[in-house]
Structures are given as C-alpha cells and as structure tokens.
Image (cartoon, rainbow, N blue to C red):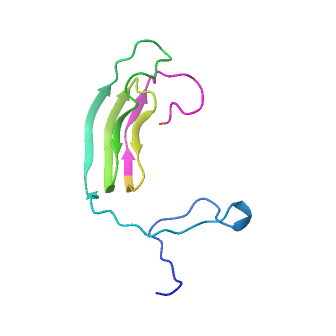
C-alpha cells in the first residue's frame, strides 16, 4: 500500500544513510522450490595438499530455496564450508552439522562454516 514496506525477516545491518543507506527492489522467483532438506549425510572432498583449492568448495549448495534445511550433515576437507546458501534463498535452517578439517589457505575467502 503506497509507501508501506512489510518485511518478512529481521534486518541485522544498519541501514541509516550515514552507513550507506539502503535500496529496495521487487523480485519474483518462478523457479523457487519450497520445503526441501538434506539430512543424515557425510561428505568428503578429495584434495591434493593442505592448501589446495582445486577441489570441492561446499558439501551442499542451496539456491532459490524457501523454507529449506540441512540437518546432521558432516563435511570433511571442503575449502569453503558445509553449506553455501546462495542469493534468493530464504528461511534456511542448519542444525547439528559439522565442518571437519577444511583444506585451503589460511586467508580471507576460505573456511566459512
């Protein structure tokens, strides 16, 4: 209605103009899937050396998912993390999962869990 904006999730970053402000865009996802989950898996990436990045990035990738979950998943050796939640995914729950022995450089852009 007019100039009213209703949000379906909390905003945790400051949006005041002094911190850069904010913009609002309308979007629609026709390919979005709902109520999908990954459970009870252990996945390992194959690597060549301890700082190798030419192998698995994430065990699970969620893209264009609404109301999804990952439960009791263990990822081992992946260089980014257990799960990568892409743009246009929302309301994703991750619980009782683990990232073990990531293989990558010890610098920015790697080892997010």
Q: How many marks?
A: 0
Q: Is residue 100 left or right of residue 105?
A: left
In the image, farthest residue toward the top: 49
Q: Residue at x 58, y 60 (%)?
A: 12
In depth, the one of 96 and 13 nearer the eye is 13
- Name which residue lies at 68% across and 67% down: 16
Quarter occupied by residue 65: bottom left
Q: Quadrant of residue 100?
A: top left
Compared to residue 92, the image places residue 95 above or below, namely above
Q: Residue at x 38, y 23 (%)?
A: 55
Q: Is residue 37 left or right of residue 52?
A: left
- Residue drawn at x 32%, y 62% as measured from the top left: 29
At which x and y percent is residue 59?
34, 33
Picture quarter containing residue 33?
bottom left
Spot the residue most to the right. 18
Point out residue 68 in the picture as x, y percentages from the top left corner: 31, 53
Q: Position of residue 2 (x, y in %)?
A: 50, 87
Does residue 40 show up magenta in the picture? no
In the figure, 64 relative to 84: above or below?
Answer: below
Give the answer, above or below, for where 49 lies relative to 64.
Answer: above
Prevailing secondary structure class for the magenta stretch in the rendered image: loop
Viewed as shown, does residue 20 lie left or right of 67? Answer: right
Q: Position of residue 57 (x, y in %)?
A: 40, 31
In this picture, which residue range is highlighted in magenta? 93-112
Whether residue 104 appears in magenta in the rendering, the answer is: yes
- Answer above or below: position of 28 versus 34: below
Q: Is residue 95 left or right of residue 18?
A: left
């Amino acid at each position: 209605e007019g100039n009213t904006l209703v949000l379906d999730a909390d905003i945790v970053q400051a949006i005041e103009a002094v911190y850069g402000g904010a913009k609002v865009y309308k979007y629609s996802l026709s390919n979005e899937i709902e109520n999908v989950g990954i459970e009870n898996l252990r996945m390992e990436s194959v690597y060549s050396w301890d700082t190798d990045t030419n192998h698995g990035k994430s065990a699970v990738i969620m893209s264009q998912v609404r109301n999804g979950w990952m439960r009791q998943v263990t990822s081992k050796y992946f260089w980014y993390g257990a799960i990568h939640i892409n743009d246009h995914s929302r309301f994703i729950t991750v619980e009782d999962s683990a990232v073990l022995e990531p293989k990558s450089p010890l610098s920015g852009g790697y080892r997010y869990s």
